[in-house]
Amino acid sequence: MAAITHPGAATPAVEPAVHAHPRSYPGLLSWIATVDHKRIGLLYGISAFVLFIIGGLEALIIRLQLAVPLNHVIEPDVYNQLFTMHGTTMIFLFVMPMSVAFFNYIVPLQIGARDVAFPRLNAFSYWVFLFGALLLNLSFLFNSAPDTGWYGYANLTEKPYAVGQRVDFWLLGLQVLGVASLAGAFNFLVTIVNMRCPGMSLMRMPLFTWNTLVTSILLVLAFPVITVALILLMFDRFFGTNFYVTSHNGDPLLWQHLFWMFGHPEVYILILPAMGIISEVLPVAARKPIFGYPFVVYATCGIAFLGFGVWSHHMFTVGMGPVATAFFATATMLIAIPTGVKIFNWIGTLWGGSIRFTLPFLFAIGFVSMFIIGGLSGVMHASPPVDSQHNDTYFVIAHFHYVLFGGSVFGIFAGLYYWFPKFSGRMLGETLGKIHFWLMLIGFNLTFFPQHFLGVDGMARRTWTYGPEQGFSGWFGNPALGWNLVSTIGAYIMAISILTFIINVVVVLRQPKTAPADPWDGATLEWAIPSPPHAYNFGSQTVVYGRDPLWMEKYTTQGIAEHGSWMPRGTIGVAEAEIEAHADGRDPGAHIHMPGQSFFPFITAAGLALMAVGMVSDWSKLADTQFSVLTFMGIAWILIGIFGWTQEPV
Amino acid sequence: MWMFLGSDCMLFGALITTYQVYKGKSASGPTPHEIFDIPFTSVSTFVLLMSSLAMVLALAEIQRGNMRGMRVWLTATAALGMVFLSGQFYEFTSFVNEGLTISTNLYGSSFYTLTGFHGTHVSIGVLWLLAIVAMSLRGKITPASALSVEIAGLYWHFVDVVWIVIFTVVYLIQ
């Protein structure tokens, strides 16, 4: 009994293709009409990275403004727009789509599938995301970038208090992005539940796939709540309702509850994919299976479940009363338990392993250590009295940057270095990679560790500048010297580290595709196929008999017996060899039916974008409604797109 | 579809919660007690319930391979849905005439938002069902596509269940 068998590998004479030749377009059009999960993954990844740079530039300007007291690099109004957009961009336009990029590329490969369950819906998700990102950033052109914080507290966001259309851009952009996230989440849920290859039970799935599953469940349940919060805000702003307006007995706290009921699961949505990446990278680097796989799974599910019960720890200072406050404090401290379990599992994986200090491993260790620091600071303000000190200060900023940058971003880079060979066919350079890692680690800690001190000293969030007498600066009698200056220098060091990464990518992409199928001695199925994979991923159906199927195939006596020799690293899978061997010279994958390309996802997404643009636009407003005629054109366009989509032959 | 319905549950849950949170808090304007016509809405509710029955019968027909029967019952489902929607429309216009608009007070705002979203869901359902009937007339729906009718049925029953919750929580328990 081998770890992987390939039923149907002994193929009889090649059958003529029974499907019509699939639709396929040339060049740029093929990217617009693509439904291939790998291409969509690349599109997501590149877009998300560009937005990472934009969000990073926003941060660099913020840090420049805060470097010394009474600085005046930018106006306060611009400062408000920058910190709002920095948060919104990094969360919704970088970490989430970059995670989805990995879900897209890697999950079908890990479960032995040829694509996701709904390929066109997958493409639709991407185009809607891109249009949402463009809409949000378009606001800068109209001096209308949102300026009310990434969590837009009511009633600062209501019409009498908020400037112009800034909040409209924000709420419409988020609604559009919500559609993209939900569509993607449904897709991955159905894919993982239904399309795993034979033998891959849930408890044999790779942990990255498990984390994708749990993240998708979180997305599906959390996003509708922010949808409602935003709809109520939109109705307040457009239709004269008073959901959050105190003068009519509305309650601004309703916004906070609804927002954080989404917002807290959202932060788990941000961290779980990165944790999934770490759970892949560490065992491979340590050459040892993950320690306590079932506990990692249960802990992940526990985090997701408990994550819905802690939202009001963002509201300890609003006066909910002792009972509610105590409940949420307890629940928040409880959630540290499953998180801690995962950390111990990772440590247990490394313990006794034969570790290779590869680049993905460095970033994974960066993740674990930085995330622990972030978790410790988080658990501190899980206590309401402590939070009354920390709330709205730089201590909270320090906490969430340690878990979001130290956690998610280090995890994302671990994944990028780890899977770069798979999707590009080249290995990223070692030297530049190490420079990137160390500069990023040092720069990151220089930026955010001092912010713990600034926070407990009382430096407030979201404030454009500070005075030299406030105690946040003034070392050696010089009012400009202080932790803020250190933090700014750290931020620019981080920027240089990212530049190093970009140079690495550019240099390496010019080299030929020489990466082997399995450069890291991986355990999971994506390493059994060429780098980059064929369009059809797997030549024939894979069957697995345990966790870490590729290790079983390579290193167990049964695996070796099945294939007659120890499969050396870099050898393509047996099924691939048989596909290549068809002697008639045709494209080996010609008899594999893959979903045809389609423009309708793009068209429908464009309709949704037009509808959203219509709702912020003043152009040609239709009488009696609040909205531009573009809105209705957009709705019509969506309906046409959906009609074409359903009628298109597959 | 089950995943989508789970998601939609959260949406309606948040809207119903908003209504509950603001119950009795309106600063001015009409109150539910003054506005609601429970007998009328009960008939409307019954119509929607009967539409779910028609949906079940439609699914049974396609599972038996009777395409014409399926079309009859799907059309009946859609028709009953449209009767429900006309009832909603009539109800809303009469409320507006009595002085309750979406911007009158918290009650109006939360009521119209909640029932408006529900009505939109019903409308999309009606369009979906009629689309299936149209595709069936062109021969695109066969007994083999019973699953797609079942999925439409799940959506329709969900919309009905949500209405039962709304009717109970909003209309009956005041």
Image (spheres, coloured by chain):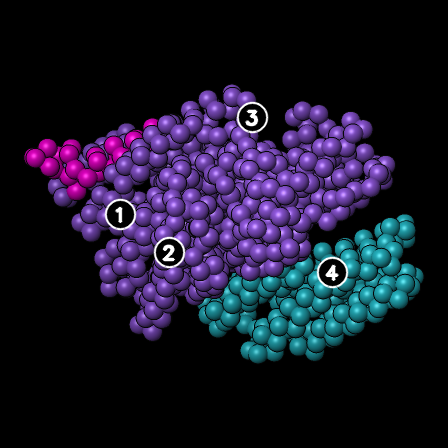
- Which numbered marker is on residue A513? 3
Whether labels 3 and 4 share one chain: no
Q: Residue at x 67, y 59 (%)?
A: B1
In the picture provided, is A437 more to the left or to the right than B153? left
Q: Chain of mark 4?
A: B
What tint does the image give chain B? cyan
The answer to whether mark 1 and mark 4 are in CB contact below 8 A is no
Q: Judge by depth and name the residue closer to the eye, A354 or B58.
A: A354
Whether labels 2 and 4 share one chain: no
**Disc 2 and disc 1: Cα gap in Å?**
34 Å
For the C terminus of chain A, the quadrant is: top right
The magenta span reads A472-497
Q: Judge by depth and name the residue closer to the eye, A285 or A338.
A: A285
Camera-nearest label, 1 or 4: 4
Q: Residue at x 67, y 24 (%)?
A: A27
Which residue position holds label 2? A348
- Which numbered marker is on residue B151? 4
For marks 2 and 1, the one nearer the N-term is 2
Q: Secondary structure at mark 4?
A: helix
Which residue position holds label 1? A394
